[in-house]
Image: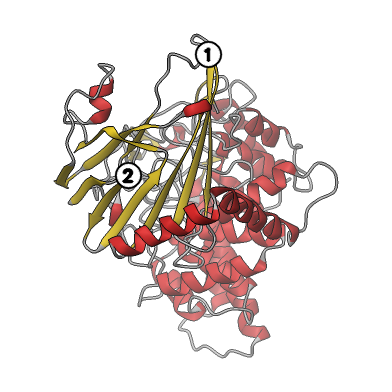
């Protein structure tokens, strides 16, 4: 719902997908002082993952878009006179309506980045639009005809019924479980229908009015193995094991021939970005061992061999901005290799290695502080760094943070990701080094005592990151932790829609194009 207090009206939009077909139904309502308002539909299509090379046109009471054998048909409460096809940002219907009229009308546009604009028959303040996707125009028309014959209410009823059925299988906690259900639903809805287990990092900012859809700016509409691990872990905790098994199977598709996991992939498992993030390979191992025998997935031994050959230093940390020795990454590596060791014993696996797995894990565990814990930093007598490029944390080694983060003395870059050491059982929550670093990060990253910031991350931003605050809240829930204040702080900055913002620029105001989707599920 969008409210306009100045003009005293509200716009309410309902969206449902038909579980039985590739149809999306949009139902709109205007409430309040609406007599002087005219409602238009505006479609910016992106078939086959891009807005380029499309053709759009009107024919009869419907609009159409096609590209490379894919078709989109739009119907519903449309008019046949006030409408136009156009080119995005080049005087199309949206641009013309800034002058209060469709002064230039065209039946067809393309090929190119096209749009459709049409006046809606909004008699009584309500209207409906249906969008059908198919591999031919006739099939798309057939989908629309079927929906219009059965009535759009049937789609909404079926859509709601599907979600009710899904939530009934979950293991809800006692009391008010609204946040629990919402979190599980948000994770589940980010799964692709054609590729089970392919859960994208976020449905936010797929393209939008401020971001292009070119290959270099994928936003969060790809599949990161790290996100899959956390999503599956959350769904397992919620009682949805079936989707977690699908996630593991999809991870098996993602795994590369050398045993590693790619930085991210398309929905079909094809790698997109080429960075090496060893925590993602470790995360795949952790999930595969946890679900061993219940679903196929990544090759555990090949992934372990990759970690042993490439670790402990990583090409990219979990923020994808720096290389070196990261406490968070090493925590994942140690936890994964320990899991492999237990799995090998439980399954009677005999693996001939030059150095026994246990010896490597012991050596990495003993060396962790020498690689990542500084005793010469300006923030205190000792604390974990976010990352040390060369594993020499007591030196003034410069760290160059990508995405415009700048160049810094490694000893002034701290963040809450070191708490992975606690989450994964590598260090105890009351370990003096953990406690000392927590105090430093509290002071440097959370000076307002409510939300945490990551210094030097995200283009040098000092904006609050609710997801980092949620990490602190998760630590607070462990034995010896400091309570759940961080969790509730992250929840308080969530907007009315329930999705936590990626950043907070001012108290309660999120970064509108970068919602990450899940502080509510306590994922990092």
Q: Residue furthest top?
A: 6
Where residue 346 is drawn, which disc sits there?
A: none
Q: Residue furthest right?
A: 174
Residue 93, x across and y down, in percent: 25, 30
Give the camera-side residue of 256 and 338: 256
Residue 296, x across and y down, in percent: 54, 80
Display colour scheme: secondary structure
Give the camera-side residue of 371 and 21: 21
Disc 2 is placed on an element classified as: loop
In three-dimensional space, the C-alpha distance between marks 1 and 2, rounded to whole angstroms, equals 29 Å
**Label 1 with label 2: CB-CB less than 8 Å:** no
Of the image marks 1 and 2, the number of the one nearer the N terminus: 1
Residue 275, x across and y down, in percent: 33, 57
Q: Picture quarter containing residue 161?
A: bottom right
Residue 273 shows up from this direction: no
Query: Residue sitting at 78 percent across and 53 percent down?
Result: 172
Where residue 61 is drawn, which disc sits there?
A: 2
Query: Residue sitting at 56 percent across and 74 percent down?
Result: 359
Pointer 1: what residue?
33
Give the camera-side residue of 12 and 391: 12
């Amino acid at each position: 719902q969008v409210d306009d207090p100045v003009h005293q009206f509200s716009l309410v939009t309902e969206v449902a997908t038909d579980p039985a077909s590739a149809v999306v139904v949009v139902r709109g309502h205007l409430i309040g002082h609406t007599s002087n308002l005219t409602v238009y539909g505006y479609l910016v299509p992106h078939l086959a993952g891009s807005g380029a090379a499309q053709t759009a046109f009107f024919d009869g009471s419907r609009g159409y878009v096609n590209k490379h054998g894919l078709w989109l048909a739009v119907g519903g409460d449309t008019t046949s006179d006030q409408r136009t096809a156009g080119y995005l940002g080049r005087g199309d219907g949206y641009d013309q309506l800034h002058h209060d009229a469709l002064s230039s009308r065209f039946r067809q546009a393309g090929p190119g980045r096209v749009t459709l604009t049409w006046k809606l028959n909004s008699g009584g303040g309500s209207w409906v639009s249906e969008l059908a996707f198919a591999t031919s125009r006739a099939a798309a028309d057939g989908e629309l005809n079927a929906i219009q014959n059965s009535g759009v209410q049937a789609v909404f009823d079926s859509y709601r019924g599907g979600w009710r059925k899904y939530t009934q299988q979950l293991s809800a906690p006692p009391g008010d479980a609204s946040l629990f259900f919402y979190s599980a639903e948000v994770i589940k809805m980010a799964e692709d229908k054609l590729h089970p287990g392919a859960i994208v990092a976020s449905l936010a900012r797929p393209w939008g009015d401020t971001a292009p859809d070119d290959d270099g700016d994928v936003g969060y509409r790809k599949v990161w193995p790290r996100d899959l691990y956390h999503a599956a872990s959350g769904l397992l905790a919620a009682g949805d094991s079936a989707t977690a098994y699908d996630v593991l199977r999809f991870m098996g598709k993602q795994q590369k021939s050398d045993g590693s996991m790619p930085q991210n992939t398309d929905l079909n498992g094809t790698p997109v970005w080429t960075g090496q993030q060893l925590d993602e390979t470790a995360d795949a191992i952790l999930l595969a061992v946890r679900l061993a025998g219940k679903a196929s997935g990544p090759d555990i031994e090949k992934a372990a061999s990759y970690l042993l050959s490439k670790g402990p230093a990583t090409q990219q940390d979990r923020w994808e901005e720096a290389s070196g020795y990261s406490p968070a990454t090493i925590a994942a590596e140690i936890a994964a290799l320990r899991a492999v060791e237990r799995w090998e014993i439980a399954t009677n696996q005999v693996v001939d290695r030059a150095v026994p797995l246990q010896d490597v894990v012991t050596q990495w565990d003993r060396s962790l502080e020498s690689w990542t814990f500084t005793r010469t930093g300006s923030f205190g007598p000792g604390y974990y760094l976010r990352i040390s490029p060369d594993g020499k944390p007591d030196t003034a080694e410069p760290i160059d943070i990508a995405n415009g983060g700048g160049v810094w003395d490694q000893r002034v870059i701290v963040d809450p990701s070191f708490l992975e050491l606690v989450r994964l059982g590598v260090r105890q929550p009351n370990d003096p080094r953990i406690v000392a670093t927590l105090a430093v990060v509290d002071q440097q990253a959370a000076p307002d005592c409510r939300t945490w910031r990551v210094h030097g991350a995200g283009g040098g931003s000092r904006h609050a990151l609710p997801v980092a605050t949620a990490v602190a809240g998760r630590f607070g829930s462990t034995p010896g932790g400091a309570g759940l204040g961080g969790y509730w702080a992250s929840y308080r900055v969530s907007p009315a829609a329930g999705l936590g913002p990626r950043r907070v620029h001012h108290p309660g105001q999120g970064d509108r194009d970068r919602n990450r989707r899940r502080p509510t599920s306590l994922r990092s």
